[in-house]
Image (cartoon, grey):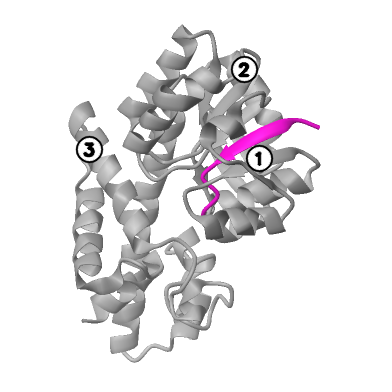
Amino acid sequence: MSIIAFIGVGNMGGGMAANLAKAGHDVRAFDLSAAAVARAISHGCTAATSARAAATGADAIVTMLPAGSHVATAYHDTLFDAASPHAILIDCSTIDVATARRVGETASDKGLKMVDAPVSGGTAAADAGTLTFMVGGPDAAFALARPILEKMGKAVIHAGGPGMGQAAKICNNMILGATMVATAEAFVLAEKLGLDAQTFFDISSKASGQSWSMTSYCPVPGPVPTSPANRDYQGGFASALMLKDLKLALAAATTAGASVPMGAQAAALYQLFANNGGDSQDFSAIVKLLRG
């Protein structure tokens, strides 16, 4: 049994921490939200009074924080100093590549092993322990992180050096955002042409229009019972988070000199949707904007 500090046990981190506790680890949970900590306790974790208290003496430190600024502050101000020399540091936040690289390099300079390991799968996969982890960092750090990540996910893939987990995540989510917009557009067009949604799904899900956005996360009610469309677009992956990831992709594209017109258009549409009150709804609710 390992002692694991888990910093950030909100919508995603809560389910992840619960699966580590279920696997037999001693999980010390810390979050600024008392409700989030209470949920973690109900799933077998113990409460820590601070991030430093959680990290001190831990075999692993896992963070799931909102943005790069939070990650940099947490590690530079607290976690690097509190971490034991043998501990593996695992940041599962989705942040910009540059910050992930800087934090990872600082860890290495301090003689600590660290990986950036953003996730794909949403809250349902976090709760079920079926996330996909895209991991950036040195081989030795990945080897230490892998057994822990495997308790929270179905796939753990080494993407390369520091920051490459984040690079894989934002590229993947740029595809997801753009394909969801295209899928929603198609269902709206089918509807306006008089084509039944289930019939269109039965055809396109077995034809060249098939994608994850259609077969696993259909943006209209009915065809995929588990999709948020059947829960009035509540839960799942919020549009605000999709917009955040698309903005990270656009910023990375600017730095890298890459052309991403589809990603840019998807970001513009999600920004419009967020501006009109859709930010807290699942990202498949973009179909509402396309219906006008």
> Sequence-wise, which precedes: disc 2 or disc 1?
1
Q: SS class of the residue under badge 3?
A: helix
**In x, y percent, where is residue 136?**
49, 26
Residue 257 visible to the viewer: no
Mark 1: secondary structure = strand
Compared across the picture, whether 258 is left or right of 188 comes to left
The relative height of residue 255 versus residue 41 in the rendered view (above or below) is above
Residue 120 in the image: x percent, y percent?
Answer: 51, 48
- Pick the front one: 17 or 31: 31
Structural distance between the alpha carbons of marks 3 and 1: 35 Å
Q: Nearer the viewer, mark 3 or mark 1?
A: 1
Give the magenta part as a residue range: 1-10
Which of the two discs, 2 and 3, sits closer to the camera? 2
**x 31%, y 80%: residue:** 188
Q: What kind of residue is marked 2?
A: Ser
The label on residue 251 is: 3
The residue lying at 25 percent from left, 57 percent from top is: 266
As drawn, which residue projects farthest toward the bottom? 194
Quarter where residue 257 is shown: top left
* The label number, if any, that marks residue 209 in the structure image: none
- Amino acid at circle 3: Ala
| Residue at horizontal 49 percent and vertical 64 percent from the top | 236
x 21%, y 81%: residue: 292
Picture coordinates of residue 222, whole percent (x, y): 52, 83
Residue 197 seen in render: yes
> In the visual, does 136 lie left or right of 247?
right
Under circle 2, the secondary element is loop
What mark, if any, has residue 84 been given in the picture? Answer: 2
Relative to 170, residue 229 above or below = below
